[in-house]
Image (cartoon, rainbow, N blue to C red):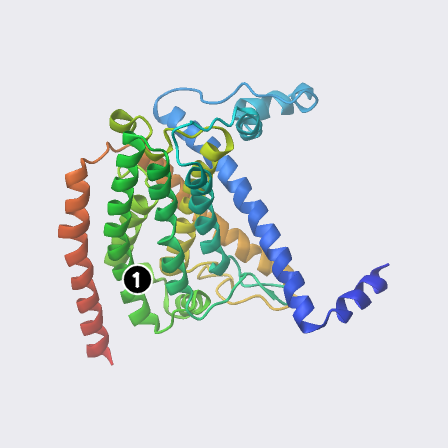
């Protein structure tokens, strides 16, 4: 059986083998991201409950597993099965489309919001090697440019949702979102330029290897990191920058008229964007899959499966730290006023980012 599979694999040729492994990576990444999205929602509910001195989700139990002594009640109290219940609920709820909406745009907007968030992850190196396979789907030499190009597409889904809903509150949310994302995309893009000046390459894998040799870039470009993480909050519409939703003013903003899985797609897109932003911060400023000890700053060799798995674990652990920060900030800071949000983006971060580029260029010139 094994020899037959080996012969079949060898018969695929280089192109077929590349396509096969690409499909396997895509499937594995999609499954992992959807799992992270589901349990990020649970983590948010449990962390918010902890901050507010509540219990959080602790009622969902599966019939067979829930009856296992100690383990069943323990998992139930942790809310482990809550994401499953939420997913089933989203599928079973009525998919209602109001008669006054622009139906074609109304249906396509959630997909446009979700798909770009996932495409960004295609160029993220979430490990070094596992066997002979690079732990990245698309190892592009212009990885940074690709991510910013794809991220800019996400706003179209939100704007389209606001326009298609044909209602004033979603429309205001869509307008706010477009202005907010355009404003902070500029600062986020400028924040990455010092990273490019220091490393000299746009390939995300090469940026990680540079940090393995010279140290994490958070120590060389701390201002860039501050601008990037604050802009990431604005780009993902998270508090204190959730003006496009702003429940106290706009009901629910751009997703007011949505229900069922179309409504869920917006939230899946938001949490996937959080994962992508966290992964980008790990890659650009915190060494990606590397740790500066135990030989974990060098790529794994084909026979070093344990090191390859360790690199993936290191990357995921770093990423989860930023996910917790995203969640924690939401429940600790109040929402900005809209004029404060725009003032911070245009009158504070934009000049600061330009000055940061100038300082980095001068320092590198003096050191050359």
Residue 111's x, y, as percent?
A: 47, 44
Residue at (48% x, 64% y) in the render: 297
Asked if residue 222 shows in the view, the reply is: no
Residue at (31% x, 58% y) in the render: 218
> Badge 1, how many Cα within 10 Å: few under 14, some, many 20+?
many
Residue 323's x, y, as percent?
A: 41, 42
Q: How many marks?
A: 1
Left-right relation of 299 to 131: left
Residue 41's x, y, as percent?
A: 46, 33
Q: Nearer the viewer, residue 353 or 92?
A: 92
Q: Nearer the viewer, residue 367 or 236?
A: 236
Q: Nearer the viewer, residue 167 or 316?
A: 167
* Image quadrant assignment for residue 15: bottom right
Residue at (19% x, 78% y) in the render: 366
Residue that label 1 marks: 192
Residue 331's x, y, as percent?
A: 32, 31
């Amino acid at each position: 059986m094994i020899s037959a599979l080996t012969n079949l694999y060898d018969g695929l040729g280089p192109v077929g083998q590349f396509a096969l492994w690409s499909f396997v990576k895509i499937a594995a990444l999609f499954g992992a991201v959807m799992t992270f999205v589901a349990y990020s929602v649970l983590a948010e509910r449990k962390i918010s409950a902890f901050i507010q001195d509540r219990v959080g989700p602790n009622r969902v139990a599966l019939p067979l597993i829930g009856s296992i002594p100690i383990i069943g009640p323990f998992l139930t109290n942790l809310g482990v099965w809550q994401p499953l219940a939420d997913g089933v609920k989203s599928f079973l709820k009525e998919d209602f489309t109001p008669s006054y909406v622009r139906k074609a745009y109304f249906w396509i907007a959630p997909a446009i919001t979700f798909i770009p968030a996932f495409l960004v992850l295609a160029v993220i190196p979430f490990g070094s090697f596992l066997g002979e396979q690079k732990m990245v789907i698309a190892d592009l030499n212009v990885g940074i440019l690709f991510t910013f190009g794809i991220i800019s597409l996400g706003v179209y889904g939100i704007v389209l949702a606001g326009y298609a809903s044909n209602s004033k509150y979603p429309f205001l949310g869509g307008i706010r979102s477009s202005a907010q994302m355009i404003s902070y995309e500029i600062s986020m893009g400028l924040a990455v330029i010092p990273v490019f000046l220091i490393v000299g390459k746009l390939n995300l894998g090469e940026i990680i290897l540079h940090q393995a040799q010279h140290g994490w870039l958070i120590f060389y470009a701390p201002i860039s990191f501050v601008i990037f993480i604050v802009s990431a909050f604005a780009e993902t519409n998270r508090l204190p920058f959730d003006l496009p939703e702003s429940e106290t003013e706009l009901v629910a903003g751009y997703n007011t008229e949505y229900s069922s899985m179309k409504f869920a797609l917006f939230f899946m897109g938001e949490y996937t964007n959080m994962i992508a932003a966290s992964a980008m911060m790990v890659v650009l400023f915190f060494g990606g899959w590397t740790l500066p000890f135990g030989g974990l700053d060098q790529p794994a060799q084909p026979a070093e499966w344990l090191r390859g798995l360790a690199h993936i674990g290191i990357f995921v652990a770093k990423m989860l730290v930023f996910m917790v920060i995203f969640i924690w900030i939401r429940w600790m800071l109040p929402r900005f006023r809209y004029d404060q949000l725009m003032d911070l983006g245009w009158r504070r971060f934009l000049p600061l980012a330009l000055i940061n580029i100038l300082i980095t260029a001068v320092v590198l010139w003096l050191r050359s």
